[in-house]
Amino acid sequence: MSKSEEITQKLDLKSTIQEEDIPAIDLYMDQVIQLFDATYNESLRNEDEKVLTKTMINNYAKGKLFIPIKNKKYSKDHIMMISLIYQLKGALSIKDIKSVLEPINEKMATEDFSLEIFYNSWVKLQQKNAVNFIDEMKSHEREVENQEAEEMDKLILLIASLSNMSNAYRKAAELLVDELTELRKGSK
């Protein structure tokens, strides 16, 4: 098995909370955490890392990253929003995540907006991104293998190459957050 295949297998990129995986009934916080743990636990770096904690969820609620909860229970919409936050938090600051999700929260509160349609579109993009990532990972590995270097140096080159791409994607996302913020200012 190649390094890229080994890594992509550990990352379990196709793991996601599908809309149909979310119960139709409202869940308590512990149940929400269990749902996320069951879905993403295999992709954690080590056993000390947590998928989601009560503190994280409370901070997201206090930061108004999703619509207010009712009776200490989380609806399907809350779980979809928490899932979006979970995916965004690896690349964006909480402030940027709030900027990205604010228009969705506003639409949910004031319009006939289907979060399910939006969320399912996101899941489709995520699944396609997983396939693209595997191809890109193999391409990076081939490029590194073509370098005249010792095995450890090749691993360092692969790490540097992936970090470079990660930074480029993060910076591109941040520029788009800024564009979204300016667009929203102009429409008010």
Image (tube, helix red, strand yellow):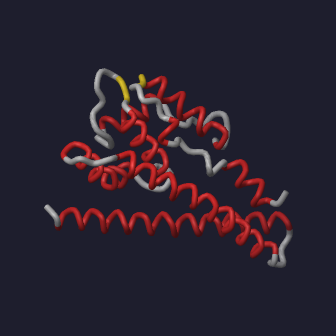
Q: Position of residue 108 (x, y in %)?
A: 26, 45
Q: Nearer the viewer, residue 187 or 118?
A: 118
Residue at 47% of width from left, 41% of height from top?
Answer: 19
The answer to whether 74 appears left or right of 124 in the picture is left
Residue at 73% of width from left, 54% of height from top?
Answer: 7
- Residue, far left: 188
Query: Where is 34 relative to 139, above or below?
Result: above
What count of labels does the image hold?
0
Say which quarter of the image contains residue 69.
top left
Q: Position of residue 72 (x, y in %)?
A: 34, 22
The answer to whether 71 appears left or right of 26 in the picture is left
Image quadrant in which the N terminus is located: bottom right
The answer to whether 96 appears left or right of 112 in the picture is right
Image quadrant in which the C terminus is located: bottom left
Query: Where is 163 relative to 80, above or below?
Result: below
Residue at 54% of width from left, 27% of height from top?
Answer: 34
Query: Where is 89 relative to 155, above or below?
Result: above
Residue at 76% of width from left, 73% of height from top?
Answer: 144
Q: Nearer the viewer, residue 36 or 160?
A: 36
Q: Position of residue 181 (x, y in %)?
A: 27, 62
